[in-house]
Amino acid sequence: MGINLYEVIKYYNFKGVPLDRVKKITKDLLISLDHLHRVCRIVHTDIKPENALLALDGTVGFKEIDKFKVLAENESLPKVKLADLGNACWLGKRYDYCIQTREYRAPEVIIRHSFDEAADIWSLGCMVFELITGDYLFQPEAKNNYGKSDDHLAQIIELIGYPHTSFALSGKDSREYFNKNGQLKKFKNLSFYPLQSVLKKRYKVKESSLLSKFLLQMIQWEPAKRSTAKDLLTHPWLTYENDDSDGYITISEDSEKFMESKFGDEMGNDGV
């Protein structure tokens, strides 16, 4: 069918896909997820770059190298479509079993709280970060004194802070990771790295303030607090355009009014 998004990330040498292309990819994926969630009533359960494809209509039989011509700067990017619904499940039922590839796994899945379509939204947030930076947002490891899930939860806390105790203790496996006060059992001293700071200082990403707000609509501990795919499609980050010729950001008048009413003075010194 086409090139998967991991191949796209690799094409850009794991240094990040250009922002305008990430926005186009993100819009396509949100449209697909909105249809999947609201119309089909299905949770994909395995959102990751390998399961999203550039639809290369009419290119069957091309040599492998020819497929990547669509990524040339002067080429418009084909539509991105979700693939591999082999582990998808219906909405409306309570599920608490393990889903999702590790790096894109939502916290409710880790602690075995019931999950719904918001688990897909978490995974998409992780994937958008990866498209922009070339790195995983979370890459947990197991050590002698803790497991991958312990480290995964610790990395989430370092990025967005501790969850409410009620949520931390709400899963079937919660007591394996958290004490009665909602603190991690196997980690005492954590370092905190706000998402905007990570984007701006480590990765030098333009639009870091607004981009972090967009991502944090998806990267929330509690599923009910994450935005839906439909709502995310209206987020102003998706309408921003960088004009590299003069260094200024241009947005539509409607988007500017929305930004002022929603974020006010929180936009930050980088203008986004």
Image (cartoon, rainbow, N blue to C red):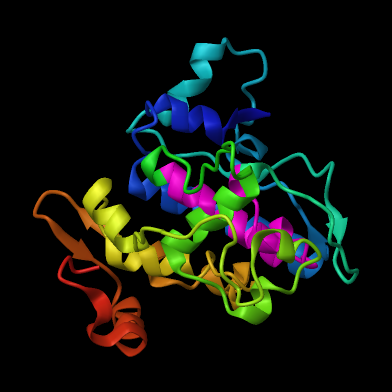
Extreme left residue here?
A: 246
Quadrant, the C terminus: bottom left
Residue 39 seen in the figure = yes
Give the residues in magenta: 103-131
Q: Nearer the viewer, residue 220 or 257?
A: 220
Q: Splitting the image into 4 quarters, where does residue 249 fall?
A: bottom left
Q: Position of residue 264 (x, y in %)?
A: 27, 87
Quadrant, the N terminus: top right
Q: Splitting the image into 4 quarters, where does residue 133 fall?
A: top left
Q: Splitting the image into 4 quarters, where does residue 95 fall?
A: bottom right
Q: Nearer the viewer, residue 21 or 149?
A: 149
Q: Does residue 4 appear to the left or right of 83 in the view shown?
A: left
**Eyeballing the image, is 137 above or below 75?**
below
**Eyeballing the image, is 147 above or below 73?**
below
Q: Residue at (56%, 69%) from the top-left corner?
A: 183
Q: Residue at (72%, 40%) from the top-left corner?
A: 83
Q: Position of residue 112 (x, y in %)?
A: 78, 61
Q: Position of residue 231 (x, y in %)?
A: 56, 75
Does 55 lie within the magenta span? no
Residue 125 seen in the figure = no
Q: Nearer the viewer, residue 2 or 93?
A: 93
Q: Residue at (34%, 34%) from the top-left corner?
A: 15
Extreme bottom residue here?
A: 261
Q: Residue at (47%, 22%) from the top-left corner?
A: 68
Q: Position of residue 37 (x, y in %)?
A: 75, 65
Q: Nearer the viewer, residue 7 or 56?
A: 7
Does 129 lie within the magenta span? yes
Q: Does residue 62 appear to the left or right of 134 in the view shown?
A: right
Q: Does residue 219 appear to the left or right of 87 in the view shown?
A: left
Q: Main secondary structure of the magenta part?
A: helix
